Amino acid sequence: MTPGRLSARFRRLPVVARLMLTVALTMALVLAGAAGLVYWRVEAALDSQLDEDLTAYQQSLDRAVRTGQQLPPGANGSLHQVLDTDGRVLRSSDTVRDRPLLTPAEREAAARGATVHRDIGALLPITTGTLRLRADRVTADGHPRIVIAAAQRGHRDEALRELLAQLALASGLTLLAASYVGYRTARAALRPVERYRVGAAALADGTDDEQDLRLEVPADRDDEITRLGHTLNRMLDRLAASATREHQFIADASHELRTPLTLMRAELDVALHRPRTAEELTDTLRAVDTEARRLVTPANALLDLEQLASGEHIQRTPTAPDRPRPPPRRRLRPYRAAAERDGRTLTVEHDHATVHIDPRWLEPVIGTLLDNALRHGADTIRLHAQTHGGRLRLSVTDEGPGFPPDFLPHAFDRFSRAEASRTTPGTGLGLALVAAVAASHNGTAHAANTPPGAAALSTSPAEGLSATIRALSFVNHLSL
């Protein structure tokens, strides 16, 4: 199998299996290196001792051959052999007798004066008669002789074989333990990820209530897995909020559009039931047109609310509260005229600072608050715009009776209208739009009565509400 195919198969394995195999392979390399180092150090120590003993025995043999003395027996397992330059055995230990210990090439090298080192037999497989020999040339009675000193390697080889077995056993057990620990650690580390996957699968398959589905993230940790859990929970929050907005939009649309559509259908059914005069058809068309207008207004308001809730179309630009488009005088002219018809006054106060907001939504907010003040308020209407610390505080106040107390908690709910205002035109979406604009600019909306009127406020959490604002009032703080 080629390395490329092997790598591809490895990448297709589960993450736990890949981690375990990686740990096992790394541990095997580390253990092999450690075992090799231990074996090399022990072998070097044994060989050094064996070579020292063999060199000492070689020197004693050389002296005995030169002087014609009897050859010493040496330590346990030591052997000797004396050859002439033709390879004939002159003297030898009983164990080796006439057995040739040197190859012809080694014998010739020793005859020329070189020192020959040689091992007979291998460590593995196990064999008998393993030797380590040393040969050199010695002159005796004017004749060159080749003196061979040999030591049996049985004890040395047995010790190394035992060491190899112990190292193999220890390394194998350590590798198994490391692989098991690596597997358990990988499983434990990835268990939260699997739990997150199961939760996400339940959400994707619709097998769980997405409003209640949240991943269990430990509060006492701050590692990569817990941060992933927090990120997924934020994603689930956004999905839940999106689903809530979708359900709310559908519920609101069906709530608000059902009545006009039913009335339009009834008018058309009556008109088609029998022939009608031109005047009757005109009356029917006017009624249908009225209901169509009732459809357009809440439909546009609902679309605006959905656009604000998504937050995807907010484009902040440097804007001065005294210069929203169109110019203030022309923009406020209809409201001034409406106030004058009722014998009331509209005053405007503002500073000249610049804030970063989306000016497209400033006009409908002001228009909604002024409409409410004109319909439900009394006496002087004051429009006040003030900036502080890069935030805009916008308020519309009048001297009306204020909100009914039981209506205050629901003032900014969609289609929420006070009982006293149900006989006047309106959809109940105006203050909901005001609250949505405030929220899209990091503000909040709050309704409260301060005698003798009502206050609708939106402010940042760092600042308190002003108790001096009376009647209908909206305050929106927008961050740069």
Image (cartoon, helix red, strand yellow):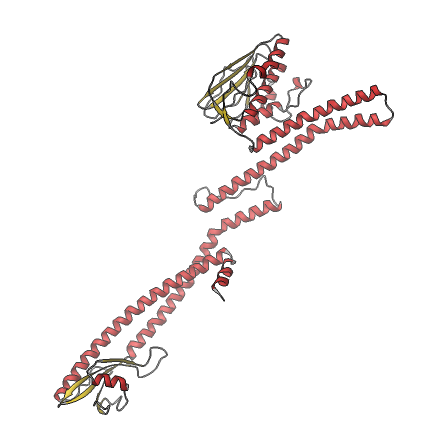
Is 234 in front, or is 276? 276
Query: Would residue 148 be visible to someone looking at this image?
Result: no
Name the residue located 55 percent from the left edge and 16 percent from the top edge.
328
Name the residue located 66 percent from the left edge and 21 percent from the top edge.
426
From the viewer's perspective, tell me whether residue 268 is left or right of residue 62.
right
Name the residue located 60 percent from the left edge and 44 percent from the top edge.
208
77 vs 19: above or below: below
45 vs 375: above or below: below
Is 258 in front, or is 354? 354
In the rendered image, residue 165, in percent from the top left (x then y), is placed at 36, 72
From the viewer's perspective, tell me whether residue 126 is left or right of residue 75.
right
Q: Quadrant of residue 163?
A: bottom left
Q: Quadrant of residue 433?
A: top right
From the viewer's perspective, tell me whether residue 169 is left or right of residue 302.
left
From the viewer's perspective, tell me whether residue 316 is left or right of residue 97.
right
In the rendered image, residue 24, in percent from the top left (x then y), is placed at 43, 61
Is 99 in front, or is 404? 99
Query: Would residue 439 be visible to someone looking at this image?
Result: yes
In the rendered image, residue 128, in percent from the top left (x then y), is placed at 33, 83
Name the residue located 43 percent from the left edge and 45 percent from the top edge.
223
In the rendered image, residue 423, in percent from the top left (x then y), is placed at 69, 18
